Amino acid sequence: MEVIAKTLPQAYHLALLELYKYGRTVPCPDYSQSILEESMTMVVTNPVAEPCISRIFPGGHHELQQYTMEICDGILDFMIGKADNVWEYTYHSRIGSQLDFVINELRRNPESRRAVIDIRDNQIDQNNTHPACLQHIQFMIRDNMVEMYVTMRSNDAFEATFMNAFGFIALQKKVAAELNVEVGRYEHRANSFHVYEKNMKQFEKAIDKIVALGYDSEELTYEYDGFYDELMEEEVPNIMAMVDEQKRKYGVV
């Protein structure tokens, strides 16, 4: 299944509607519940176009800022391998080690199809109770714009997809800035795009809003520039205070 829209919120709202209408209910024994599931590709033709923020996703500016900093800056990479948690990786730890190659490859050959980042590490993820959902990222330059193609084996449509895509688009912006080109299309493929049984009531309320107002309604979005970006920026000191507290807890200098 595929949805195509200009902005991220539009594509996200359309994807939720398609999941609601056409998804299949299947068992999820690992979490002792069922899920509503469909395969989904969201195509965002202009990921920097306003409005950039959905009001539907169950989070806020604090969560979105922290997640973006985790993806782009690796603020929680120091948590990997700590004894009392299950963190065996972060997305940033796997992306960051390959990002220089991507940038250098696209500088070498702007038409390259080799600027690929693989996230899955079979030696770790085969035995991990929380294996990476993100599997693969490819960057391409087309029409002097950086395009980004993301593949996820599994994606919580209601609780995670919007934050995932927003954080990955922030990474796309970072690569585009390094290469001094514009940001192009963003494609987000989830082989299992799903909602957990425990979240169905909240999900159905979100669907009711999208149906009532329209997937592209301004009432379901926020502007990023000049509003939401400022709210997110205000959260940075609180987020870094949390990071410092965790570093003290684990004796990280």
Image (spheres, rainbow, N blue to C red):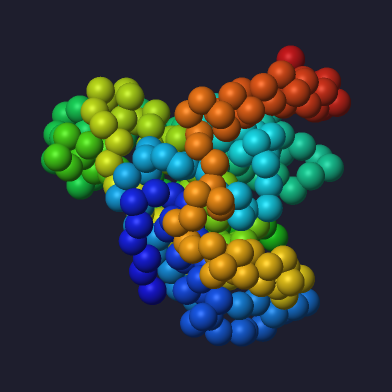
The answer to whether 129 appears left or right of 133 in the picture is right
Q: Residue at x 55, y 84 (%)?
A: 24
Residue 36 visible in rendering: yes
Q: Residue at x 62, y 84 (%)?
A: 26
Q: Nearer the viewer, residue 69 or 211?
A: 211
Tell me: residue 248, above or below residue 217: above
Please provide percent x and percent y for residue 111: 14, 40
Q: For the C terminus, which image quadrant?
A: top right
Q: Position of residue 3 (x, y in %)?
A: 37, 65
Residue 106 vs residue 187, the one in the foreground:
187
Residue 123 visible in rendering: no
Asked whether 222 or 48 is in front, the reply is 222
> In the shown orientation, is residue 213 left or right of residue 253?
left
For the N terminus, give its image quadrant: bottom left
Which quadrant of the structure image shows residue 49?
top left
Name the residue nearer the viewer: 119 or 138.
Answer: 138
Q: Residue at x 82, y 23 (%)?
A: 245
Q: Position of residue 173 (x, y in %)?
A: 38, 32
Q: Does residue 10 lie above or below 115 as drawn? A: below
Residue at 69 percent of width and 60 percent of height:
129
Q: Residue 193 in the image: x percent, y percent?
A: 52, 68
Q: How many marks?
A: 0
Residue 251 is left or right of residue 154, and the answer is right
